[in-house]
Image (cartoon, grey):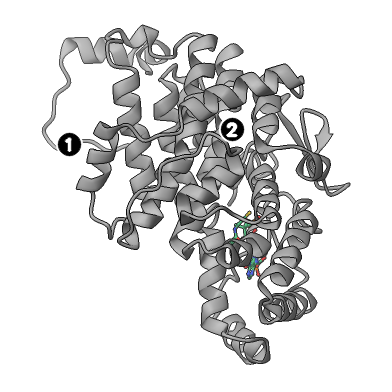
Amino acid sequence: MTDPDIKKGLAGVHADTTAISKVNPETNSLLYRGYPVQELAATQPFEAVAYLLWHGELPTADQLAELQAVERANRSLPDDIRAFIDAMPTSAHPMDEARTVVSLLGSFETAGIANVLDAAGTPAENLDRSIRLFAILPAIVAYGQRRRRGQEIVEPREDLGYAANFLWMTFGEEPDEAVVDAFNRSMILYAEHSFNASTFTARVIASTLSDLYSSVVGAIGALKGPLHGGANEAVMHIFDEIGSADAVVAWLDDALAAKRKIMGFGHRVYKRGDSRVPTMKAALDTLVAHYDRPDVAELYETLESEFVSRKGIYPNLDYPSGPAYSLMGFDTLTFTPLFIAARITGWTAHIMEQQASNALIRPLAAYSGSNERHIEGYVPDAAEVEALERPEEAAG
Ligand SMILES: CC(C)(COP(=O)(O)OP(=O)(O)OC[C@H]1O[C@@H](n2cnc3c(N)ncnc32)[C@H](O)[C@@H]1OP(=O)(O)O)[C@@H](O)C(=O)NCCC(=O)NCCS
């Protein structure tokens, strides 16, 4: 019998308050610090949205210029970090690569902090660390894709904004404005989403007063799973498997008969459609026109309408972003690392919010194992007998 107090998967549980974002499934809306995400995506550079998530307000022109200057100054991969990356096999999954590099950066950045009591860092130190991670992650992701393709590293360009420079470092070509705009929008849409699994993981780790890098490493591990961030990669595998729009119906018949989950559809919170999809779908449409690939739109729309009419389950953000990233030229394996580069802003805002008003996150579990039993012949000593007589004090 299920205990009504148990909320499996913490579904429906409010674990804390947050002032960073609000997901409202009833009105199908997502607000970052009060602003609808689609308005931010249409009007702001990603750097301004990062500032908003960290500080609670959009930056003034001077504040934005200041953040952009720090971001541009911290874009390059230091040689020692690059040497470590080169020591990793090119066959390593890029999520494992990114997770390892963030951990490595942490060991360099927090070197000298010997006392675990100081690990959590001050708010100012954590903001600096957040900005530096935000600045360097594009280099890690871009170099990762180039390394797997056997290409040389491309150094960042200080004259380009975040999104344009990210594309430049990945492809070594100055990107078209339409592509920069679609990419910038995708970064904003992926930046933050309340207590999703990876953000919650980051908050759990932050709540122990561990350091920011440890929280981010844990969050990357959570993001890798196909029920979370790994879905955008999985969507592209499905597109490759189906091939073209005319193969959708037969493919879906087989997939549903085999009880497969169709990646890119469904959401724990949104049950009537993901608020971010229309904006990302519009960006995908721009890319379809830019690259003249109507076949991609046809496959996208056919699978969507077939699946929605059969199951009543709607696409999530990973559904349009997968093919959009593919059209831009990113390898399928690079999609989830792009999600890291965007979500680092939300994760770090949550880590700082958690530590500003901390309570150790430690839920209870209802035990469902065997009844108490004993090792034959074992005789407890006097101290143990005494502790058993004071069970509340003995419990750890
Ligand atoms: C995101 C997700 C984990 C949310 O799951 P959830 O809230 O725990 O809901 P469940 O997985 O329990 O799904 C409820 C029902 O819908 C079905 N369902 C949900 N998403 C589905 C999908 N993408 N394909 C097929 N069936 C799906 C489940 O099989 C389940 O059916 P059942 O009641 O007959 O067993 C789930 O929709 C999913 O696995 N989607 C695919 C992965 C994905 O795109 N993740 C990115 C999320 S942003």
The spot of residue 393 in percent (x, y) is: 39, 10
The spot of residue 87 in percent (x, y) is: 20, 46
In the image, what residue occupies the spot 63% across and 36% down?
195
Query: Could you give the CA–CA distance between mark 2 and mark 1, rounded to whole angstroms?
Result: 51 Å
Q: Is 31 placed left or right of 94 in the picture?
A: right
Q: Residue furthest right?
A: 27
Q: In the structure shown, which secondary structural element does the residue marked by tag 2 occupy?
A: helix
The kind of residue tagged 2 is: Thr
Crowding at mark 2 (Cα within 10 Å: few <14, some 14-19, many 20+): many
Task: Please tell me which residue lies in front, 259 or 371.
Answer: 259
Q: Is residue 86 above or below residue 80?
A: below
Q: Within the image, what quadrant is residue 257 found in? A: bottom right
Q: Is 121 placed left or right of 83 in the picture?
A: right
Q: Indicate which disc, 2 or 1, sits on the residue closer to the N terminus.
A: 2
The kind of residue tagged 1 is: Ile
Q: Is residue 24 above or below residue 64?
A: below
The spot of residue 108 in percent (x, y) is: 29, 23
In the image, what residue occupies the spot 43% across and 47% down?
141
Identify the mark at residue 375; answer none if there is no mark: 1
